Amino acid sequence: MKIDIKESFIKTRKAGSIAAGALDEVEKIIKPGITTAKIDRLCYDYINDHDAYSAPLFYRGFPKSCCTSTNHVVCHGIPADKILREGDILNVDVTAYKDGWHGDTSRMFQVGKTSVKAKKLIETTYEAMMKAIKILKENIFLGDIGSTIQEHVESKGFSVVQDFCGHGIGQDFHKAPNVLHYGKKGTGEKLKAGMIFTIEPMINAGKYETKILNDGWTAVTKDKSLSAQFEHTVGITKDGYEIFTESKN
Ligand code: MF3
Ligand code: CO
Ligand code: CO
């Protein structure tokens, strides 16, 4: 069945705005002393109150409604009774499923005062994602995205995680293509108007290698260095792009 581009964009816009709205609410409660379980509850409630589902909940056995990845956790951290402390940095990743479509987004949050190094890492990660988004339009290559991110990140002395990537998204949470955050210009698939996918670079202050903890989900940096990530869901148009998960603030 062929799906109308207009319909897919309208529905992803809706799902994306709910996901972004949840993160806007998370922003308001971040402070030393709260638990990541509290963030999870807030995301669960916000998404339900907007007549949507939290896509991560029970996805391949994932037990919570969002991912909370603190300090050296790269991604897929599981919300728990862990208390956030002054100086922590964390990524919160939410995905809303609304009227059959997904919107997936994540942001970094800083708990109280954080180090200069942490701030620089977060800033560089955000810049890398936005630089890649700004080149998007029909007929550029998937590899142009990865090379734009890698070039910026490495110029600042940080490294790009290779074990996880962005992904096509729509009626399925994760689908083709894989969107690598490193690579060479002019390589890979050509982008077509109507494509919808995520860009979600994970950037490490140290080496790029990761490992998965015994819970089967939590990915951490092997060298225990800090890691940061941002994620937007984007759609390709003839002459550019649309970001579906922008903050309303
Ligand atoms: N939101 C994550 C992504 O960006 C995926 C989380 S899957 C989960 O693709 F099961 F860990 F929630
Ligand atoms: Co996500
Ligand atoms: Co994603």
Image (cartoon, grey):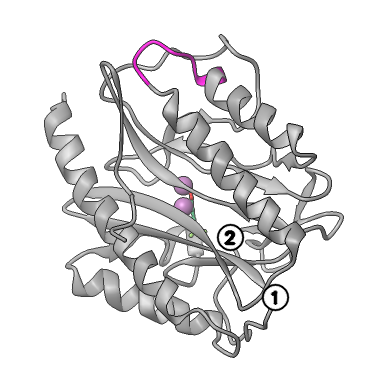
Residue type at mark 2: give it: His
Residue type at mark 1: give it: Gly
Label 1 with label 2: CB-CB less than 8 Å: no
Ligand 1 within 8 Å of the CB at mark 2: yes
Q: Secondary structure at mark 2?
A: loop
Question: Could you say where residue 111 lies in the image, as x and y percent from the top left?
Answer: 60, 76
Mark sitting earlier along the chain (1/2): 2
Which of the pair 145/219 is nearer the observer? 145
C-alpha separation, residue under disc 1 versus residue under disc 2: 20 Å
Task: Give residue 87's mark.
Answer: 1
Which of the pair 49/135 is nearer the observer? 135
In the image, is residue 142 part of the stretch drawn in magenta? yes
Ligand 2 within 8 Å of the CB at mark 1: no
Task: Give residue 158's mark.
Answer: none
Is 145 situated above or below 242? above
Is 131 situated above or below 45? above
Quadrant of the rendered image containing residue 31:
bottom right
- Label 1: how many residues lie within 10 Å, few (<14), some (14-19) or many (20+)? some
Q: Secondary structure at mark 1?
A: loop
Is 33 situated above or below 197? below
Q: Nearer the viewer, mark 1 or mark 2?
A: 1
Q: Which residue is mark 2?
A: 76
Which of the pair 215/21 is nearer the observer? 21
- Label 2: how many residues lie within 10 Å, few (<14), some (14-19) or many (20+)? many
Question: Could you say where residue 5 lies in the image, as x and y percent from the top left?
Answer: 17, 27
Q: How many discs mark residues in the rendered view? A: 2
Is 129 situated above or below 107? above
Is residue 3 visible in the rendered structure shown here? no
Q: Quadrant of the C terminus?
A: bottom left
Please state the extent of the stretch shown in magenta in the rendering. 137-143
Quadrant of the rendered image containing residue 29:
bottom left
Is residue 78 visible in the rendered structure shown here? yes
